Image (cartoon, helix red, strand yellow):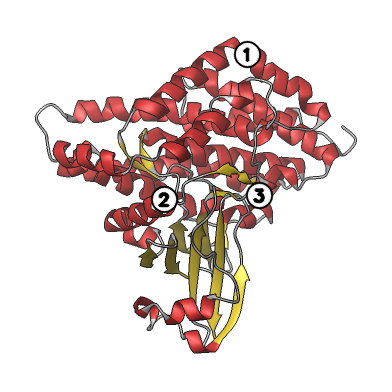
Amino acid sequence: MEHTYEFLSADNIPAYLASRKETASVIDPTSIVEMKEVGDGNLNIVFIVKDSKGQGIVLKQALPYVRLVGPSWPMSPDRARIEYETTVIHSEAAEHLVPKIYFYDTDRYIIAMEDLSDHKVWRTALNAGEKNFGSAESVGEYIARATFATSIFGAGAEKHKKDIARAINPEICLITEDLVFTEPYFPGDRNSYLSDNEPDAQAIIDDEQMVLEIGELKFKFMTAAEALIHGDLHTGSVMVKSKEDGTEISTRAFDSEFSFYGPIAFDIGAVLANFYIAMARSIALGRTEHVEFIQTLPTALWNSFEIHFRKLWPTRIDKRVFSDQLLEVLLEVWKEDAFGFAAAKMVRRIVGLAKTTDIETLDPNIRVGAARGVLRSAQLLIRERHKHSSIDEVTTKVREIMDEVRTGDGR
């Protein structure tokens, strides 16, 4: 796909900002002193731009292809519109938990948003062994507020149906359908792992119950249009700002270009998966105190989601058959599915394309055990999800598995 619009660069950004009146009070385009490209390399160009007074802005531009692969994998840059619209919609329900948006350039697929460079990417903080108290609760609140507001409960039936049509995102959804729910369960060109983990990857393929349930979860992902979900919510798409003692100052969810109307449990499961992956890293590094902290995060996330969804429930538009008893059923189903979606995400991050730095930056001798622990824990989650186990119980079992298969340090 040949691009027909100009890509952002350090050479053209000052003139571009000067042409946008929407940001005149945000940044001075005549005194730009810093332009840092911070895109993760997977899909987009992302610049943090600062002026001489220290004021900043973030410019994110969608390319007409997958940046990780190149022009050989074309992709519509319209995903930028999806991210822009989703962030605006989610801000109506949870303004304090998403970045502020200044404008969207429909011609060049550029989103201008709040500079959060005084925050840290949560994955980076967790990788470094930091503790961020309160952020898991904020992410749970974000999921609850955003999904309730855009579900039939908060939006009403007519608006919900119309909004589903607006937010259809087939190209991006296909990435998840392939990379998360399909390719790890078949030998594929885009799968990769350490040779010592080949038996672990094969065990996933040979696990008939897991493959069956992944198929069920994929079907639900593709058909259950419950709410406008983030679609790619993980510790790499959450920014955190904390005091020196780790107490939360601010937590923001960003990078919602994978957004569409999907199952509410998917976002919950995606975050759970990343907590467990972070746990595997800290276990591999022998950071016992940090493991204890991470072990609290899954329950904190779920409890916050449940508390905030329950608080919103009395405001549902249609109360005729959407009873309090139904809410109890839904919460149990969402918890069960969250475990399943977490399992799918965990396998993908070890076996499939686009892995996480939590595991990939470990020395190979300890990475083997960390990857094995993530994969075996995913198999556990698939089985535990039907037992009505608590988040705490499952997390304890995940830790036990990861401890057991840890490698390195003479093991």
Q: Which of marks 2 and 3 is in front?
A: 2
Q: Which residue is drawn at 42% across and 22% down?
A: 219
Q: Is residue 111 left or right of residue 150?
A: right
Compared with 255, 20 (above or below) is below
Compared with 284, 239 (above or below) is below
Q: Residue at x 54, y 47 (%)?
A: 1
The amino acid type of the residue labelled 1 equals Asp
Compared with 236, 336 (above or below) is above
Q: Can residue 167 be seen in this view?
A: yes
Given contact means CB atoms under 8 Å apart, are the residues at marks 1 and 2 in contact? no
In terms of sequence position, does the residue under pointer 2 or pointer 3 come before the other? 2
Q: Which residue is drawn at 62% across and 30% down?
A: 347
Compared with 286, 178 (above or below) is above
Question: Which corner quadrant of the image does residue 180 belong to?
Answer: top right
> How far apart are the two marked residues, 1 and 3, measured between alpha carbons?
32 Å
> How far apart are the two marked residues, 1 and 2, measured between alpha carbons?
38 Å
Q: For label 2, count other residues whose C-alpha is less than 10 Å away and answer few (under 14), some (14-19) or many (20+).
A: some
**Outermost residue, top side:** 208
**Which residue is denoted by mark 1 in the rendering?**
207
Whole-percent x, y for residue 141 in the image? 37, 49
Query: Mark 3: which secondary structure?
Result: helix
**Which residue is denoted by mark 3 in the rendering?**
290
> How far apart are the two marked residues, 2 and 3, measured between alpha carbons?
40 Å
Q: In this view, does 38 lie to the left or right of 302?
A: right
The amino acid type of the residue labelled 2 equals Asp
In terms of sequence position, does the residue under pointer 1 or pointer 3 come before the other? 1
Question: Which corner quadrant of the image does residue 266 belong to?
Answer: top left
**Which residue is denoted by mark 2 in the rendering?**
78
